[in-house]
């Protein structure tokens, strides 16, 4: 299983806020990934189109 | 039981601790008849590593002693209460490292998109905390700036 390191400061903050660090980290990453993919998809839609073809710059 | 756990069990028994129960899938590794917990760790350089799940389980257990072994020794090079390293992040020269086991699906997706999974997750978590108007003091500014740039 892939492993990532967490800073203790971040871990402590999550505990202080009453969060489950493992769950919070996973949820935050999934949300950020979704946002990244949505942005990528949106920029794809906004590409200029001329004569039915995508403009190449 | 791995080799370090076998050495730890033998050492605990030499100390006269009886009625040890071994937990292969949860922490602490051993629980004595009196309810005391023992978590066995192999030291690498000066670090011992706990997963987020282990941190939670050990905190719930309460009375846990961490037994630190080197690759070869038959007795621990250090033993101390888990609460010490949990609070201060280190015990003498031994430092705590916290890891999280990320789901493989998420990890692979991040790699596919050219992201560094560790950095991405740390930033995503910091960002989520910022949304809560709570900024952990230990998060480096460089990470925050990188994240903001990405979001622009």
Image: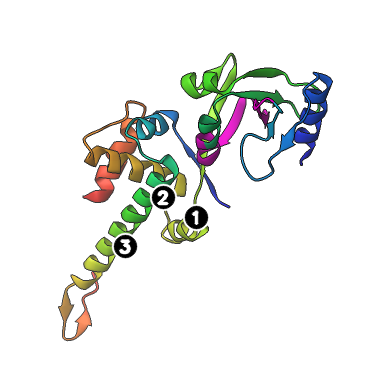
The answer to whether tags 2 and 1 share a subunit is no
Tell whether B83 sits left or right of B45.
left
In the displayed orientation, state which residue is furthest to the top. B92
**Mark 3 lies on residue:** A37
Q: Name which quarter of the figure residue A49 lies in.
A: bottom left
- Lateral position of residue B64 relative to residue B86, left or right: right
Q: Residues within 10 Å of mark 1 (few under 14, many from 20)?
A: few
Bounds of the magenta segment: B34-56
Q: Position of residue A20 (x, y in %)?
A: 40, 41
Residue assigned mark 1: B103
Q: How far apart are the alpha carbons under marks 2 and 1?
A: 8 Å
Label 2's element?
helix
Kindly indicate whether the residues beneath marks 3 and 1 are on one polypeptide chain.
no
- Residue A41 lies, with reference to residue B43, above or below; the image says below
Q: Please tell me whether mark 3 or mark 1 is closer to you in this view.
A: 1
At mark 3, the secondary structure is helix
Instruction: Decide which of B73, B27 is in the foreground and name it.
Output: B27
Name the residue tied to disc 2. Answer: A26
Quarter that holds the N terminus of chain B: top right
The answer to which quarter of the image holds residue B57 is top right
Task: Give the x, y percent position of residue A45.
Answer: 21, 72
**Contact (CB < 8 A) between labels 2 and 1?**
yes
Q: Is residue B145 magenta?
A: no
Q: Chain of mark 3?
A: A
Which residue: 38% across, 33% down?
Answer: A15
* Residue B73 seen anywhere in this rendered image of the structure: no
Q: Secondary structure at mark 1?
A: loop
Q: Position of residue B84 (x, y in %)?
A: 53, 18
């Amino acid at each position: 299983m892939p492993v990532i390191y967490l800073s203790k400061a971040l871990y402590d903050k999550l505990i202080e806020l009453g969060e489950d660090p493992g769950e919070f980290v996973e949820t935050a990453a999934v949300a950020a990934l979704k946002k990244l993919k949505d942005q990528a998809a949106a920029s794809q839609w906004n590409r200029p189109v001329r004569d039915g073809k995508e403009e190449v710059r | 039981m791995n080799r370090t756990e076998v050495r730890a069990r033998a050492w605990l028994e030499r100390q006269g601790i009886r009625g040890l129960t071994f937990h292969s899938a949860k922490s602490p590794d051993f629980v004595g008849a009196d309810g005391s917990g023992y978590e066995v760790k192999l030291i690498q350089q000066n670090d011992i590593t706990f997963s987020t799940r282990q941190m939670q389980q050990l905190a719930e257990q309460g009375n846990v002693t961490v037994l630190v072994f080197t690759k070869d020794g038959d007795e621990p090079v250090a033993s101390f209460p888990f609460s010490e390293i949990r609070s201060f992040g280190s015990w003498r020269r031994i430092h705590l490292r916290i890891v999280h086991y990320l789901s493989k699906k998420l990890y692979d997706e991040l790699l596919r998109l050219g992201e560094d999974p560790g950095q991405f997750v740390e930033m995503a978590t910091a960002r989520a905390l910022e949304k809560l108007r709570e900024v952990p003091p230990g998060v480096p500014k460089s990470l925050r700036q990188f994240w903001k740039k990405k979001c622009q």
